[in-house]
Image (cartoon, rainbow, N blue to C red):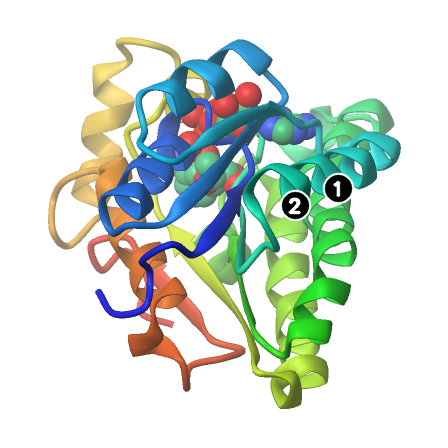
Amino acid sequence: MRGLKDKVVLVTGAGRGMGQAIAERLTAEGARVAVTDVDRETARTTADALDGAAGFRLDITDAGEVKTRVGEIVAALGPIDALVNNAGWDRLAPFLETDEDLWERLIDINLRGPIRMTKAVLPQMVERQSGRIVNIASDAGRVGSTGESVYSACKAGIIGFGKTIAREVARHGITVNAICPGPTATPLLESIVGEGNEKLIESLKRGIPMRRLGEPDDIAGAVAFIVSDDAGFITGQTLSVSGGLTMA
Ligand SMILES: NC(=O)c1ccc[n+]([C@@H]2O[C@H](COP(=O)([O-])OP(=O)(O)OC[C@H]3O[C@@H](n4cnc5c(N)ncnc54)[C@H](O)[C@@H]3O)[C@@H](O)[C@H]2O)c1
């Protein structure tokens, strides 16, 4: 893909799952990736396997750490050309069985986290009159999903937030887009449905027109496209990568 060579891309939650696949794909396209994760070890192990990448602990719920770490990443790799807000977390429960503590955690990771990250990297993108922000939202944020009420609210929120930022910074050459995975085979999905819960996995597949779960690489390809020069005139958009599950 055009324009990815030597681009500096910060990916959150890149120690495993989709974030790891995104870091691998961007590296294969020639980018230099800041592999960040709340889990320092997986961030470093992932980065060590990738040419030109560097691994950092970065907890997106910690405002102080976000600020300090973004500074360290710029010092190590250079100005950030693209931010991929990938880190996320969920726990399945009917709304009436949830409480304030769970809402708080969901909102802090899935909504405040990407907002914090955007605030931390956007000023330098404006200064350089160029940049890309990609928010990994979810089809749950477009159409809802049973057992994921507050998570869905956060993902819908991040889609709306991104559209607004897209409008505000378009004149500075910065694009902001959302990618919405459907059910995708990652450790998060395993933890949500319960490892080995084949019955539930089969019913998820039946709901997907292409009759399979997403793979992390499916998401990584879409992210690489959005970060590339080929997507330079695309902003404020929401792209489902979910085998046709959602045609919104
Ligand atoms: N897997 C799915 O079916 C699915 C579907 C729709 C959307 N998503 C979204 O895709 C993104 C990636 O999910 P995944 O399935 O790869 O999950 P995953 O749990 O496999 O990986 C997420 C990574 O984020 C990290 N993380 C969690 N909290 C963090 C924090 N506070 N700061 C920094 N890093 C943190 C974890 O350590 C982990 O390495 C998330 O935003 C998720 O909501 C996933």
In the picture, residue 246 is in which quadrant? Answer: bottom left
Residue picked out by circle 1:
71
- Residue shown at 14% from the left, 40% from the top: 212
Seen from the viewer's position, the closer of residues 27 and 145 is: 27
Q: On screen, 74 above or below 65? A: below
CB atoms of marks 2 and 1 within 8 Å: yes
Where is residue 172 drawn, in percent x and y? 65, 84
Residue 231 percent across, percent down from the top left: 35, 76
x and y percent of residue 128 in the render? 65, 73
> The residue under label 2 is which amino acid type?
Val
Q: CA distance from mark 2 to mark 1?
A: 5 Å
Q: Say few, some or many: other residues with alpha carbon within 10 Å of mark 1 (under 14 / 14 to 19 / 20 or more).
A: some
| One can see residue 121 in this view | yes
Which disc is residue 74 wearing? 2
Element type at mark 1? helix
At a point 71% along the width and 48% down the height, the residue shown is 117
Looking at the rendered structure, the number of numbered marks drawn on it comes to 2
